[in-house]
Image (cartoon, grey):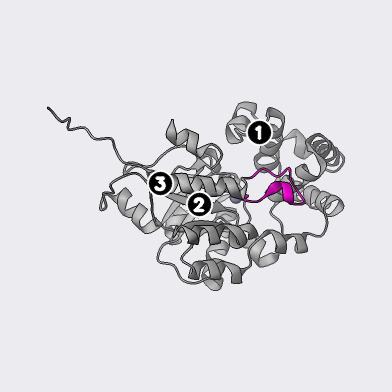
């Protein structure tokens, strides 16, 4: 009998979550997220197949100073949602798993709803066609020039939002990447107040507070930076980029428990949403590593400021396949 010298290279799988909630029982059942039961099933399957690692261990593996018996897996949760505190952390604690929670500092500090989330809730409230039509009408009326100068490449849009229909992906790309952010914010804030209600009270129900975030830190969870304004970093000027990341970094330091490791996750997260300058600045500000949303596994060859993630939708099928 002979043994090959080639062994399958081990990998780190990072699973990415956003909304985790019992959608049919919520006020906004059309929000795109994963149900709690499905989340439990995924944890059970992943914990049976992989070593559920802390970030510290995962980084040792990437550096080559730790060789596990099987592939590693870690969980990330973006946007600092209240359900992460209320529902997700208790389940992670049952399984003794460390989660990484990317928080948007302006939402916590100033009680505002991030435009990306206003967009989600308006689509869920009004249905897509009605919302898109009223949004575009407002845009035409108030800032026709902003629309004329906003360009959307449909293929790029679809790649950025693979789970959405072509129409929704195109609109989301226009909204999140192409439109002038100030013009966009004004329109979406008005529509949000008209169709949904007061931003401040909505924000305090949607996001974890500083106190809740400190509680999950004390329970063993790690907080990750996820910017101050949740804009695609690649669309910012150097000055805006600097301002966003510096504000976010100092709010995390002022309000939270110290952490030895500070991960970061890029808003939106595809390669076109961040830049070399963003990576350089994150490093300079003391972040340890950063996650994008490019689909795939990570090995010692993967740059630590461009760690890939797998979306929770279909994660088991993908890893089985
Ligand atoms: Zn986000």
Q: Which label lies toward us, 1 or 3?
A: 3
- Place of residue 147 in the rendered image (x, y in percent of width and height, measured from the top left): 76, 36
Horizontal relation, residue 9 to residue 235: left or right: left
Foreground label between 3 and 2? 3
Position of the C terminus, as image quadrant, is: top left
Left or right: residue 7 compared with residue 19: left
Is residue 27 within the magenta segment? yes
Q: Position of residue 180 (x, y in %)?
A: 71, 44
**Dot 1 or dot 2, earlier in sequence:** 2
Label 1, secondary structure: give it.
loop
Q: Residue furthest left?
A: 1
Q: Secondary structure at mark 3?
A: helix
62 or 76, nearer to the observer = 76
Residue that carries the numbered disc 3 in the rendered image: 48
Query: In terms of depth relative to the viewer, which is nearer, 187 or 195?
Result: 195
Question: Is any part of residue 151 visible from this angle?
Answer: no
Say the numbered circle drawn on residue 164. Answer: 1
Q: What span is in magenta? A: 18-33
Q: For the point 87% across and 40% down, which residue is it?
A: 141
Give how far apart the Cα atoms at labels 3 and 2 are: 18 Å
Res 197 quadrant in image: bottom right
- Tag 3: Cα neighbours inside 10 Å, few (<14), some, or many (≥20)? few
Of helix, strand and loop, which mostly describes the magenta segment?
loop
- The residue that label 2 is drawn on is 76
Mark 1 within 8 Å of ligand 1, using the beta carbon: no
Of residue 164 and residue 313, the one placed in the foreground of this image is 313
Q: In this image, 256 relative to 74: left or right?
A: right
Residue at the spot 31% in from the left edge and 50% down from the top edge: 61
């Amino acid at each position: 009998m002979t043994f090959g010298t080639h062994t399958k290279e081990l990998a780190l799988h990072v699973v990415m979550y956003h909304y985790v909630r019992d959608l049919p029982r919520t006020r906004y059942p059309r929000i795109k997220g994963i149900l709690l039961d499905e989340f439990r099933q995924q944890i059970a399957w992943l914990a049976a197949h992989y070593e559920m690692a802390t970030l510290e261990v995962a980084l040792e593996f990437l550096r080559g100073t730790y060789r596990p018996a099987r592939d590693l897996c870690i969980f990330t949760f973006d946007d600092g949602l209240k359900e992460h505190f209320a529902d997700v952390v208790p389940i992670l604690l049952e399984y003794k798993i460390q989660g990484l929670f990317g928080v948007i500092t302006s939402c916590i500090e100033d009680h505002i709803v991030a435009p990306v989330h206003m967009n989600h809730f308006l689509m869920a409230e009004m249905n897509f066609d009605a919302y898109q039509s009223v949004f575009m009408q407002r845009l035409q009326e108030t800032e026709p020039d902003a629309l004329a100068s906003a360009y959307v490449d449909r293929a790029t849009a679809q790649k950025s939002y693979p789970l959405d229909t072509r129409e929704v992906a195109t609109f989301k790309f226009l909204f999140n990447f192409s439109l002038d952010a100030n013009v966009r914010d004004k329109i979406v804030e008005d529509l949000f107040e008209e169709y949904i209600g007061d931003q401040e009270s909505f924000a305090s129900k949607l996001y974890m507070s500083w106190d809740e975030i400190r509680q999950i830190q004390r329970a063993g969870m790690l907080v990750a930076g996820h910017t101050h304004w949740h804009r695609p970093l690649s669309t910012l000027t150097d000055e805006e980029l600097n301002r966003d990341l510096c504000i976010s970094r100092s709010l995390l330091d002022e309000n939270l428990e110290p952490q030895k490791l500070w991960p970061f996750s890029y808003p939106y997260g595809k390669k076109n949403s961040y830049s070399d300058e963003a990576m350089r600045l994150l490093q300079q500000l003391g972040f340890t590593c950063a996650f994008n949303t490019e689909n795939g596994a990570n090995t010692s060859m993967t740059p630590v400021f461009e760690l890939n993630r797998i979306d929770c939708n279909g994660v088991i099928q993908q890893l089985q396949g």
